Image (tube, rainbow, N blue to C red):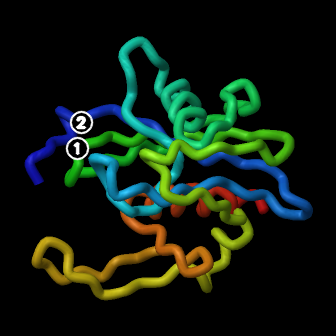
C-alpha cells in the first residue's frame, strides 16, 4: 500500500441510469485482462482524469470511450462521495447520469471484456448482497459483494453502489 490519499490520482466513474420496460437499469463492465489496473474486475464505466476537465466530464468522456454512449445523450444528475483506493492510488469520483431511453452501446475491446446491465431494484434487494472469505495478498478477509446474476461486484465499485443503494432506499 504505497499510495497515499494526498497523492491520489483523480478518476471518475458513471452510474448511467436508463429506463427499460418497468425497470431502471445501469451499465457495468467486466474489464479485460490487458488493462493496467483492476484486470478482469467488474466496474462502472470510467477512468483517469485528464488535464482541463471537470471530473464529471471525465466520467462522461470515459463512458463514451469505453462503451460508446455519446456524452450528448447523458443528462448529468450529480455526484456521490469520492472513494480512495489505496492499492492503485486512485481517488474515484462517482457520478450519476440519466438517459431517457436505453442507449446504443459499442464496447472498446481493449478495455472492456463484457458489458451488462443491472437493475436498481436488484441493487436494493438485500438477497444479492453477500460476503465470502477470501485471501487477499496473504491476508484473510471477509469480502462483501453484490451478486448480479453470478457476477461479483466488490471493492471500490461495491462501495460506490452501496452509497447509491442507500440513497435509492430513501426515495423508492
| Mark 2 vs 1, N-terminal side | 2
Q: Residues within 10 Å of mark 2 (few under 14, many from 20)?
A: some
Label at residue 138: none
Assign a secondary structure to mark 1. Answer: loop
Residue designated by label 1: 89
Instruction: Provide residue 146's location: percent of width, then percent of height.
Output: 52, 74
Quadrant of the rendered image containing residue 27: bottom right
* Quadrant that contains the C terminus: bottom right
Residue under the image location 76 percent in, 31 percent down: 73
For the residues labelled 2 and 1, say whether their Cβ atoms are less than 8 Å apart: yes
| Along the viewing direction, whichever of 41 and 110 lies nearer the viewer | 110
> How far apart are the two marked residues, 2 and 1, measured between alpha carbons?
5 Å
Which one is nearer the viewer's eye here, 102 or 127? 102
Residue denoted by label 2: 8
**Secondary structure of residue under mark 2:** loop
Q: Viewed as shown, does residue 16 lie left or right of 58?
A: right
Direction from residue 59 to residue 7 in the image, left or right: left
Q: Nearer the viewer, residue 90 or 114?
A: 114
Q: At 42% from the left edge and 68% from the top edge, which residue is drawn?
A: 154
x%, y% of residue 78? 62, 35
Dot 1: few (<14), some (14–19), or many (≥20) neighbours within 10 Å? Answer: some
User: In the drawing, does residue 5 fall left or right of residue 11?
Assistant: left
Viewer-proximal residue among 85 and 117: 117
**Is 21 located above or below residue 124 in the figure?**
above
Give x and y (percent) for residue 86. Answer: 21, 51
Amino acid at each position: 500500500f504505497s499510495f497515499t490519499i494526498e497523492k491520489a490520482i483523480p478518476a471518475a466513474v458513471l452510474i448511467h441510469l436508463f429506463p427499460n420496460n418497468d425497470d431502471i437499469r445501469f451499465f457495468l463492465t467486466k474489464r479485460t485482462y490487458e488493462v493496467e489496473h483492476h484486470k478482469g474486475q467488474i466496474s462502472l464505466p470510467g477512468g483517469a482524469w485528464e488535464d482541463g476537465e471537470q471530473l464529471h466530464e471525465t466520467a462522461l468522456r470515459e463512458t463514451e470511450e469505453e462503451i460508446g454512449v455519446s456524452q450528448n445523450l447523458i443528462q448529468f444528475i450529480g455526484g456521490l462521495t469520492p472513494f480512495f483506493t489505496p492499492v492503485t492510488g486512485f481517488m474515484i469520483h462517482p457520478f450519476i447520469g440519466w438517459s431517457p431511453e436505453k442507449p446504443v452501446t459499442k464496447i472498446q475491446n481493449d478495455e472492456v471484456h463484457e458489458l451488462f446491465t443491472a437493475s436498481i431494484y436488484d441493487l436494493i434487494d438485500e438477497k444479492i448482497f453477500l460476503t465470502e472469505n477470501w485471501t487477499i495478498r496473504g491476508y484473510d478477509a471477509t469480502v462483501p459483494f453484490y451478486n448480479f446474476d453470478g457476477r461479483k461486484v466488490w471493492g471500490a465499485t461495491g462501495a460506490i453502489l452501496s452509497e447509491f443503494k442507500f440513497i435509492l432506499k430513501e426515495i423508492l
